[in-house]
């Protein structure tokens, strides 16, 4: 009754694999952009100046309290309309779906990662910060040379688990027509009426990458256990 | 922006109700509340089963938890959408499809919250209850769970916020919750996509931010009055 060979070779297989590749690319590119943004937002939230702290707080709360799907809809349908005409036309010529998806995913993931980095920084004893300052380092220099190197080590496990969320969240890009794995599975389903096979392939792919990421987290915690403070 | 809100606010809030089916923001809240309510007993059962003394119970449930947590919610929705009709024999509506997907998905996440609550309580409570002659189930019911559930309250409110955000995926299977309604409004207005989706974002924000502040309040109240602890 179930014919898995349909999705393991031939044109349907090619579609699904192309989808998987695009999903992986979305996740990788988003991770690349989201990490620096997350560090920046975390620093804003810890800044010694109140307006900057507020800015960081507003960013994190505004992003986290709105579903990713609504972000995607806004960045795909809404935001391009606000741009000047010339830029808009250039954008529509290119791959606007993928660009919108990456923008939405990056902003969304960065908000969550910023909170993880912030709690990592807060886990470092305040005397470390005071020692850095009393040696004559400025706020940013203390952060960069003293606090962040220690904090990032604690932060890696939660960041890996955010990466897992990011991987699953790439599936939502299907709503704005990005040809990633979920989209291709639905395409194969409607072209072949083989829903079980198409979704089995997609589920197995999502699951394997997820397990790989979970395994990475376990390996990291084994290799670099939390140091006693 | 003004006349956009003036024209569509009612449609945005309740959909076509009372002339048609309920939709919009009201449907989003209703769906999220129902899903969480139904997911709670499931989560409790799965969470306890994750810590069961019998491997035959513990292993399949652990496998289920890993599978559901490793796949996107959208995948669960698709499975429910395409396979419930074949499985049950009659066509399931969009609302029940989404509800079932959310209950399964949230049940698994709640199970982890329950498990963390029980594990976080420490072994002493269970051992003390057992040594007083209670059975494993009696000890769970009257000693461990009442304490564990109390610590879980802030996580439950946060889970409700997540569930509200998750209902937005109903959009994909054509359920007329608030994201879907916003897209309908956008199609009718046509010229103001940024404003329409900004309103959508603000609506979600007010709802979810309010609830997460509530969770924060519960958490800080709980901290002020710590539960009585007997030193180990």
Image (tube, coloured by chain):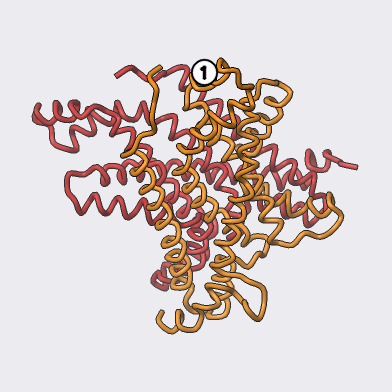
Q: Residue furthest front?
A: B132
Residue A21: x %, y % from top left? 61, 42
B135, above or below B194, in the image: above
Q: Residue at x 65, y 36 (%)?
A: B45
Q: Residue at x 43, y 55 (%)?
A: B211
Q: Residue at x 53, y 56 (%)?
A: B164
Q: How many marks?
A: 1
Chain A colour in the picture: red
> Residue at label 1?
B128
Residue B65 occupies quadrant: top right
Say which of B80 and B18 sits in front: B18
Visible in this render: residue A95?
Answer: no
B36, above or below B42, in the image: below
Residue A138: x %, y % from top left? 13, 36
Residue A216: x %, y % from top left? 52, 26
Side (left or right) of A217 relative to B53: left
Q: Tag 1: Cα neighbours inside 10 Å, few (<14), some, or many (≥20)?
A: few
Quarter of the N terminus of chain B within the rendering: bottom left
Side (left or right) of B53 relative to A8: left
Residue B21: x %, y % from top left? 67, 73
Visible in this render: residue A64?
Answer: yes
- Indicate the chain on which mark 1 is placed: B
Q: Residue at x 53, y 72 (%)?
A: B13
Side (left or right) of A60 relative to A104: left
- Judging by colour alone, the chain drawn in orange in this rendered image is B
Say which of B29 and A19 sits in front: B29
SS class of the residue under badge 1?
helix
Quarter of the C terminus of chain B within the rendering: top left
């Amino acid at each position: 009754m179930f014919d898995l060979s349909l999705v393991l070779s031939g044109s349907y297989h090619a579609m699904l694999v192309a989808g998987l590749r695009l999903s992986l690319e979305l996740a990788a590119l988003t991770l690349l952009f989201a990490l620096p943004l997350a560090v920046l937002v975390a620093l804003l939230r810890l800044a010694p100046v109140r307006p900057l702290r507020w800015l960081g707080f507003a960013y994190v709360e505004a992003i986290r309290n709105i579903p990713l799907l609504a972000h995607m809809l806004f960045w795909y349908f809404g935001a391009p309309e606000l741009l000047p005409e010339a830029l808009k036309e250039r954008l529509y010529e290119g791959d606007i779906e993928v660009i919108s998806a990456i923008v939405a995913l990056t902003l969304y993931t960065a908000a969550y990662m910023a909170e993880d980095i912030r709690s990592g920084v807060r886990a470092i004893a305040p005397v470390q910060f005071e020692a850095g300052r009393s040696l004559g380092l400025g706020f940013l220099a203390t952060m960069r040379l003293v606090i962040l190197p220690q904090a990032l080590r604690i932060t890696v496990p939660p960041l890996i688990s955010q990466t897992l969320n990011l991987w699953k969240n790439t599936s939502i890009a299907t709503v704005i027509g990005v040809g990633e794995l979920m989209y291709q599975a639905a395409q194969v389903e409607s072209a072949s009426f083989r829903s079980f096979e198409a979704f089995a392939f997609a589920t197995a792919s999502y699951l394997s990458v997820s397990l790989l990421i979970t395994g990475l987290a376990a390996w990291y915690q084994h290799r670099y256990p939390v140091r006693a403070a | 922006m003004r006349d956009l809100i003036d024209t569509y606010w009612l449609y945005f809030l309740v959909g076509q109700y009372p002339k048609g089916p309920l939709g919009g923001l009201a449907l989003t809240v209703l769906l999220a509340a129902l899903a969480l309510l139904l997911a709670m007993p499931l989560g409790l059962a799965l969470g306890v089963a994750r810590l069961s003394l019998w491997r035959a119970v513990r292993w399949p449930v652990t496998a289920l938890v890993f599978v559901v947590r490793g796949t996107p919610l959208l995948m669960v929705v698709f499975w429910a959408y395409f396979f419930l009709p074949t499985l049950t024999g009659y066509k399931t509506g969009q609302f029940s499809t989404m509800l079932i997907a959310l209950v399964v998905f949230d049940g698994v996440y709640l199970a982890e919250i329950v498990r963390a609550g029980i594990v976080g309580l420490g072994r002493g409570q269970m051992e003390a209850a057992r040594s007083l002659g209670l059975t494993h189930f009696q000890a769970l019911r009257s000693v461990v769970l009442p304490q564990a559930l109390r610590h879980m309250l802030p996580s439950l409110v946060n889970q409700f916020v997540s569930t509200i955000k998750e209902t937005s995926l109903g959009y994909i299977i054509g359920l007329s919750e608030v994201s879907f309604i916003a897209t309908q409004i956008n199609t009718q207005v046509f010229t103001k996509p940024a404003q329409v989706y900004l309103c959508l974002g603000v609506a979600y924000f007010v709802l979810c931010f309010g609830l997460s502040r509530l969770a924060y309040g519960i958490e800080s109240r709980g901290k002020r009055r710590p539960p009585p602890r007997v030193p180990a």
